[in-house]
Amino acid sequence: MAVRLKDIARDLGVSVVTVSKVLRGNKDIGDETRRRVLKRMKELNYQPNMLARGLASGKTYTMGLVVPDLVHPFFAEFAKSLSAVLRESSRALIITSSEEDPEIERQEIRTLLHRGIDVLLIASCQSSLRNFYEIGDDRTPYLLFDRNFPHLAAHFVGSNDVLVGEMATNHLIETGRKRIAHIAGQGTSPAFDRLRGYRNAMIDARLPTPDSYVFTGSRLEETGDKVAAEAIKHFLALPEPPDAIFCYNDLTAIGAIEAVLAAGLRVPEDIAIVGCGNMPYNDYLKVPLSSIDHGTSELGRRAGELALDLVNSPEQPPKNILVPPTLVVRASTRPAVQAT
Amino acid sequence: MAVRLKDIARDLGVSVVTVSKVLRGNKDIGDETRRRVLKRMKELNYQPNMLARGLASGKTYTMGLVVPDLVHPFFAEFAKSLSAVLRESSRALIITSSEEDPEIERQEIRTLLHRGIDVLLIASCQSSLRNFYEIGDDRTPYLLFDRNFPHLAAHFVGSNDVLVGEMATNHLIETGRKRIAHIAGQGTSPAFDRLRGYRNAMIDARLPTPDSYVFTGSRLEETGDKVAAEAIKHFLALPEPPDAIFCYNDLTAIGAIEAVLAAGLRVPEDIAIVGCGNMPYNDYLKVPLSSIDHGTSELGRRAGELALDLVNSPEQPPKNILVPPTLVVRASTRPAVQAT
DNA sequence: ATGCTGAAAGTAAGCGGTTACGTTACGGGA
DNA sequence: TCCCGTAACGTAACCGCTTACTTTCAGCAT
């Protein structure tokens, strides 16, 4: 079996408490004793039993992460980056997926809390806040990422999604488009904020945004490509079809490109398209896709740092960490008028 | 704070042990008592403290997963599917990434073992077996997936990669190609087996496979697209360039398509290309990519089931679970001779 | 000499469960 | 009537570690 504190104590003729104190760097121990204990720990390759430590101390050295979908590159990359930060402070990460199902999310949160985690990180797929009151009861500190709840005073790490919407829209405006449409998401703060950013930019540029230029779809993370097909059908049936589309995310943008091409039109000549998320394969698509990059690994890093901070000072006032987005231009938004 | 067995016992005037027995479905309890305990558990919304249970019983109801890269769609999908299986038996999953670094992998394994997990699942990036002797010492059952070690008598869940290579190559042969090349991986069992499958198929078809038709690259999971560019340069410089290429994975195939197109040749007319992994975006590439599908979620499911089985009977003889691959044909391998 | 201080160690209790045995009371077979 | 088996529950110890509180003793001021 594994080496225990007891074994080291016995070997050295000291008490378990003494060894435990050395382990945790307690001042309470003489130099000579400390040295002997540390030496023996190395020799035996001692690793503390985290279950026992967690039970006795309340700290588990474990963080919990709940994402709506592990396969989505954004969440995967976030998890990877977060994981790297936690590894440095030798904490484990329990990752669970809610599959975009509020009931599963609820279940996963409860499981994590009762399993014992120091901090919970979550991109919630809830529309209500019920789950979060439960978390509050358990006094486990938590932070939201990617998706925020305006009326919940919680820590948040994410993009400035209003700015995301503005940047994408302004980019289309700057390349000379006038009739700019938006395929919008639903029910989450990024969806809401990106729409707002889009509206802001259009109003600033004094461009019209008829209601018919905003097509709202749901579950765009998983089925954005399908939804985009409907959206394009809708847009192309308008008396004045758009000459550019800002899509809620890249999957939707990909679907939009496919649908536009299938309709016999050209991207970007007839319709320019910009997405959001800057997925790895954007360069290799039929039309390489312009996109807004969230700085995902930066997000993961910042979230990890905040989480570590919350372990020590759980009661601090809510922080709101926004990582600035960047625009990555590719072929799908080359200027409409090739003035040469 | 959370509800404990003690609270329920007190409320009902029975002992903690009685409640514990009910919790675990022990026969040893009368119907009436059992009913009262269960009722009270529901009322108080009791959830067992996993740390305490783990410490006392040795079972942690937690599995550990080590993957080389969380962002890779294969591992993400595997993790997702595995996670779903474990959720059904209310077990948590600790996911860690080795970043394709043997030393990190070693570290992560040790951390997991000392944290206490019931089963370890790992796609190892080791070339040596050193880590696995360590695991053996801790008597924690483990299973390998995706990447196997021929000389290690361990449980394995993965593709039949020889068959993968044969299927891909045979498909190219059946569509009329004669000069078929392979961009091969390095150092892992899938790389080795797919190469063998390629060779098998070529020999069976009495087609030549000069050494110059096999280009070996490393770290294809992360940089396959770059490596493919070199490979294509190499192939096109041959006196008799190939008319088809079987690529170790989809990322490599994507890079190959890009490079072939950039060289002014057509896919599939001049060079057909088949990949491996059947990534989500294969339909949307410049040339939609034919690929071998591993049945990734099936793999995750089978791995999860085996892992659950190992909890109860850790000492069973090594199982070797191979999920049959399937071919998904897209534009990149349309027949060379459109005989109409 | 007496008492106080602080460094260095130890003692005991407990975290929330589980496990291996006891104990009790009842009923049936001989 | 006696014994024993069994159902139903309880007792005590322990899992490996931490926490809060002693204890011990040297050094120093009074």
Image (cartoon, coloured by chain):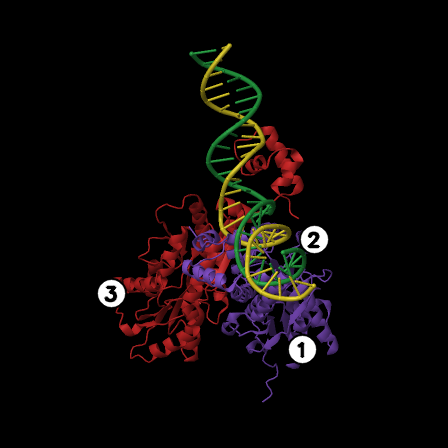
Chain colours: A purple, B red, C green, D yellow
The residue located at (30%, 72%) in the rendering is: B213
The image quadrant where one finds the C terminus of chain B is bottom left
Q: Nearer the viewer, residue A35 or A171?
A: A35
The residue located at (44%, 62%) in the rendering is: A39
Secondary structure of the residue carrying numbered label 2 = helix
Secondary structure of the residue carrying numbered label 3 = loop
Percent from the top left, x then y, of residue A88?
A: 52, 66
Task: Confirm whether residue B295 shows in the render.
Answer: no
Q: Which mark is nearer the camera, 2 or 1?
A: 2
Percent from the top left, x then y, of residue B225?
A: 43, 73
Q: Nearer the viewer, residue A309 or B239?
A: A309
State if disc 3 and disc 1 touch (CB < 8 Å): no
Percent from the top left, x then y, of residue A319?
A: 68, 66
Measure the alpha-carbon separation of dots 1 and 3: 60 Å
A141 horizontally vs B184: left or right: right
Give the quadrant of residue A78.
Answer: bottom right
Q: What subunit carries mark 2?
A: A
Give the quadrant of residue A244.
Answer: bottom right
Q: Which mark is residue A133?
A: 2
Q: Which mark is residue A170?
A: 1
Q: Which mark is nearer the camera, 1 or 3?
A: 1
Secondary structure of the residue carrying numbered label 1 = helix
Comes first in the chain, label 2 or label 1: 2
Query: Mark 3 is on which residue type?
Result: Arg
Q: Nearer the viewer, residue A199 or B49?
A: B49
Q: Which mark is residue B206?
A: 3
